[in-house]
Image: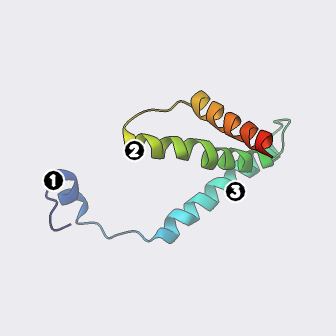
Amino acid sequence: MAGFTDVHNRLMSVYPDVGEIWYFAILCFAILCGCLGVGLWETYTTPAVVIYGIILCIFCVIPVGIIRSITGLEVTMNVLAEFVSVNSSLTWIAC
């Protein structure tokens, strides 16, 4: 942080860094709370929905964020879905 002297870095420099294990612990606790919440309340679904939501974010939301951060262009989910479906159907045709 030697080269950065903006207000945020100066204010945060007095706090010690937090290890990545804390972020992982909070993630596990949040997943556990989500699974327990879905499983214990009468939601008419299974706790697997929480895992499905995480997988959906990994395969859909994160690529959209990467494209946005690299190019500055926002790709909506329907464009990404069309791109994936067209490419998957072309691979079936090529076989």
In the picture, measured across the screen, residue 38 lies left or right of residue 63, that is right
In 3D space, how far apart are the residues under numbered discs 2 and 1 (Cα atoms)?
Answer: 22 Å
Q: Which residue is mark 3?
A: 32
Disc 2 on helix, strand or loop?
helix
Disc 1 on helix, strand or loop?
loop
Q: Comparing marks 2 and 1, which lies closer to the viewer?
A: 2
Residue 73: image x %, image y %?
A: 40, 34
Q: Which residue is mark 1?
A: 6
Residue 70: image x %, image y %?
A: 39, 46
Residue 56: image x %, image y %?
A: 67, 44
Is tag 3's residue or tag 2's residue first in the polypeptide sequence?
3
What's the residue type where badge 1 is placed?
A: Asp
What's the residue type where badge 2 is placed?
A: Ser
Q: Which residue is mark 2?
A: 69
Disc 3 on helix, strand or loop?
helix
Residue 74: image x %, image y %?
A: 44, 32
The color scheme shown is rainbow
Are the residues flagged by discs 2 and 1 in contact, CB closer than 8 Å?
Answer: no
Q: Residues within 10 Å of mark 1 (few under 14, many from 20)?
A: few
Residue shown at the point (63%, 59%) measured from the top left: 29
Residue shown at the point (40%, 68%) measured from the top left: 18
